[in-house]
Amino acid sequence: MKKILVIDDEPAIRALLSKILEREGFFVITASDGKEGMKLFIKDPVDLVITDLIMPEKEGMEVIMELKKKYPGVPVIAISGGGLNTPESYLNTAKLLGVSAVLEKPVRKEKFLEVVRHALK
């Protein structure tokens, strides 16, 4: 069973993504910000990290950079609904950092699962 870490500061988004993934047979761990997410990852590495980009404590960009530096083999999917800028600007930056895929919020279930399966190959 593949383990996936979902990092998002919005409880409703965390719950939704977790529910979708668990229904597909994945084991899901969640974190409310990048700081908590990295602690969980270091304690128990996962097969895939899905992270929001704009969060308190430690933003998704920082999580991506740390993962790519210390754990370059782990696939990462970046998601964003934007913030002060459009979601595209944040997601384009995440692409430059080497994420496996990017998704704009709100995510569509079918597209989300397609991207997850591809990242885990």
Image (cartoon, rainbow, N blue to C red):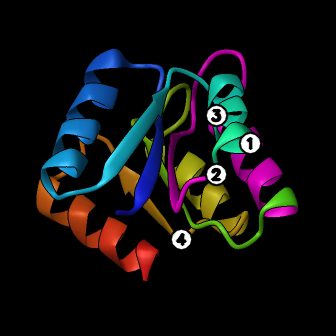
Look at the image and give the residue range highlighted in magenta. 45-69
Tag 2: amino acid: Pro
Q: Position of residue 54 (x, y in %)?
A: 57, 29
Foreground mark, 4 or 2, reads 2
Mark 2 and 1 residues: CB-CB less than 8 Å, in contact? yes
Sequence-wise first label, 2 or 3: 3
For marks 2 and 3, give the CA distance.
Answer: 8 Å
Disc 1 packing (10 Å; few <14; some 14–19; many ≥20)? few
- With 69 as the anchor, is 67 left or right in this view? left
Identify the image quadrant of residue 6. Answer: top left
- With 106 as the anchor, is 99 left or right in this view? right
From the viewer's side, name the closer residue of 119 and 90.
119
Identify the image quadrant of residue 72. Answer: bottom right
Identify the image quadrant of residue 91. Answer: bottom right
Query: Which of the numbered marks, if any, corresponds to residue 100?
Result: 4
Foreground mark, 3 or 4, reads 3
Disc 3 packing (10 Å; few <14; some 14–19; many ≥20)? some
Q: Which residue corresponds to mark 2?
A: 45
Q: Which residue corresponds to mark 3?
A: 40
For marks 4 and 2, give the CA distance.
Answer: 17 Å
Q: Which residue corresponds to mark 1?
A: 42
Disc 4 packing (10 Å; few <14; some 14–19; many ≥20)? many
Sequence-wise first label, 3 or 4: 3
Q: Is residue 53 magenta?
A: yes
For marks 1 and 3, give the CA distance.
Answer: 6 Å
- With 120 as the anchor, is 107 left or right in this view? left
Tag 4: amino acid: Ser
Q: Position of residue 15 (x, y in %)?
A: 26, 27
Sequence-wise first label, 1 or 4: 1
Mark 1 and 3 residues: CB-CB less than 8 Å, in contact? yes
Dot 3: what SS?
helix
**Is any part of residue 102 visible from this angle?**
yes
